[in-house]
């Protein structure tokens, strides 16, 4: 295991910078909406064909055809705004039918684009990834129509309602949504092609409950702010940001139940935050995102955005039976104990400030570096290089 003095382990290194540059490293990158500039991006997706970014502060989606071959490259497509120079909720006032209000999560699956439109309380779906700007979505999950935006459809919590859905994932053929405002994760037994109710709930005793930590306190079956989801057929991981931890369920949960694994806390009943202290390789502070994928050698890794500690932690998979497991690598900080925004120095290609979204794909880790108004793509080498 890497000691706390390791710097840039696993041969990980910044590969590409998207967003405006930081003049002299002492000023944040510009955030005015253009084809090259971002404002507090919170979600990112990367696959063999597309790079998709939730440019959250500008209430839009930007798409690049593959990884650009140079830094600060212009996006190819913008969604939810008429042009690259416009911003604002609901397409700058045109209406929710073609607009977003704080997009935070994104997935491309089977040629379709899914976006968590958090403050409109819905998941927007394009049945084909758009290659033309300002293409409207085809339908949504969580609202009766594209013109409706009330939380929980303007009524009580149910199996077909959403309240601040911040994250989503398709895992082993099933759609998972982090229904953050309702303190739960919803699971569909498949990937729906229309607005249909969820089949399974995690974090609540039933489909009509929404209390923080089930109303009884922190435990193995509760959430404060479930924010992001990752995994495969062997393990389901949920970033419970408000409880400063990641919970893991073995296999494919068929019903609500207790998690099998916790990262970031010493046990299932603890939700301690340790601000302004050395964190080490086992602690988390507001982990807002996570992603499972491969390094360049094909080894499976779990990447966790330890957001308030301004770093990304990496665990090789499987993690095993032990909870509170130590990460094997840290990105964005010189060692496991450092936690300062941009290392308390300046914006550099290797620093981070409130990383909020992740996507690990074939040795490339896309990081929505929200506090720096940019997306960084890192190259992640094989685990044996970390010894």
Image (spheres, rainbow, N blue to C red):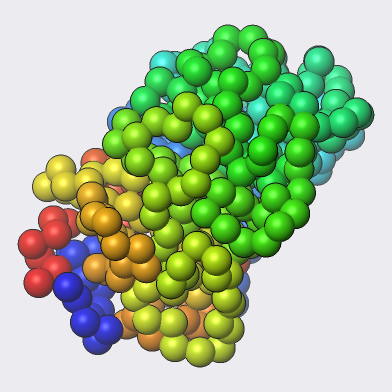
> Could you tell me which quadrant the C terminus lies in?
bottom left
Q: Quadrant of residue 371?
A: bottom right
Q: Nearer the viewer, residue 280 or 207?
A: 207
| In the depicted structure, whether residue 324 falls above or below residue 85 | below
Q: Residue at x 23, y 50 (%)?
A: 318
- Residue 182 appears anywhere in the view: yes
| In the depicted structure, whether residue 351 falls above or below residue 144 | below
Q: Quadrant of residue 159?
A: top right
Coordinates of residue 141 in the picture (x, y in percent)? 69, 21
- Residue 77 appears anywhere in the view: no
Q: Nearer the viewer, residue 57 or 27?
A: 57
Q: Nearer the viewer, residue 10 or 19?
A: 10
Q: Is residue 74 left or right of residue 12?
A: right
Coordinates of residue 211 in the picture (x, y in percent)? 76, 49
| In the depicted structure, whether residue 247 falls above or below residue 354 | above
Q: Is residue 207 left or right of residue 48?
A: right
Coordinates of residue 16 in the picture (x, y in percent)? 36, 55
Q: Nearer the viewer, residue 97 or 336?
A: 336
Q: Residue at x 43, y 72 (%)?
A: 266
Q: Is residue 296 left or right of residue 38?
A: left
> Could you tell me which quadrant the N terminus lies in?
bottom left
Q: Residue at x 21, y 82 (%)?
A: 3
Q: Residue at x 18, y 65 (%)?
A: 11
Coordinates of residue 355 in the picture (x, y in percent)? 51, 62
Count the numbered circles shown: 0
């Amino acid at each position: 295991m890497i000691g706390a003095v390791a710097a840039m382990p696993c041969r990980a290194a910044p590969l590409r910078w998207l967003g405006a540059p930081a003049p002299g490293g002492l000023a944040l990158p510009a955030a005015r909406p253009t084809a090259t500039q971002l404002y507090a991006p919170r979600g990112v997706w990367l696959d063999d064909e597309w790079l998709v970014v939730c440019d959250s502060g500008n209430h839009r989606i930007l798409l690049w055809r593959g990884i650009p071959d140079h830094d600060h490259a212009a996006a190819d497509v913008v969604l939810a705004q008429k042009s690259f120079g416009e911003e604002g909720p609901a397409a700058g006032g045109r209406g929710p039918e073609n607009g977003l209000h704080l997009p935070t999560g994104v997935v491309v699956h089977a040629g379709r684009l899914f976006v968590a439109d958090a403050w409109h309380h819905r998941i927007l779906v394009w049945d084909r990834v758009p290659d033309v700007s300002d293409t409207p979505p085809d339908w949504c999950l969580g609202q009766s129509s594209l013109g409706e935006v009330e939380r929980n459809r303007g009524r009580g919590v149910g199996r077909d309602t959403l309240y601040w859905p911040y994250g989503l994932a398709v895992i082993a053929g099933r759609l998972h949504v982090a229904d953050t405002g309702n303190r739960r994760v919803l699971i569909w037994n498949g990937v729906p092609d229309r607005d249909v109710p969820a089949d399974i709930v995690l974090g609540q005793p039933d489909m009509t409950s929404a209390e923080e930590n089930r109303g009884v306190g922190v435990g193995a079956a509760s959430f404060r702010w479930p924010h992001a989801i990752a995994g495969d057929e062997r393990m389901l991981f949920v970033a419970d940001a408000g409880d400063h931890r990641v919970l893991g369920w073995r296999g494919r949960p068929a019903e609500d139940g207790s998690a099998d694994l916790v990262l970031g806390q010493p046990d299932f009943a603890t939700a301690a935050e340790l601000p302004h202290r050395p964190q080490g390789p086992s602690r988390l502070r507001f982990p807002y995102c996570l992603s499972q994928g491969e390094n360049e050698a094909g080894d499976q890794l779990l990447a966790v955005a330890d957001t308030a500690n301004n770093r990304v932690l990496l665990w090789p998979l499987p993690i095993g039976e032990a909870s509170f497991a130590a990460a094997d690598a840290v990105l964005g900080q010189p060692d496991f104990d450092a936690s300062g925004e941009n290392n308390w120095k300046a914006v550099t290609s290797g620093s981070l400030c409130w990383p909020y979204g992740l996507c690990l794909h074939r040795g490339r880790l896309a990081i929505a570096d929200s506090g720096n108004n940019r997306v960084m793509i890192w190259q992640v080498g094989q685990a044996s290089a970390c010894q």
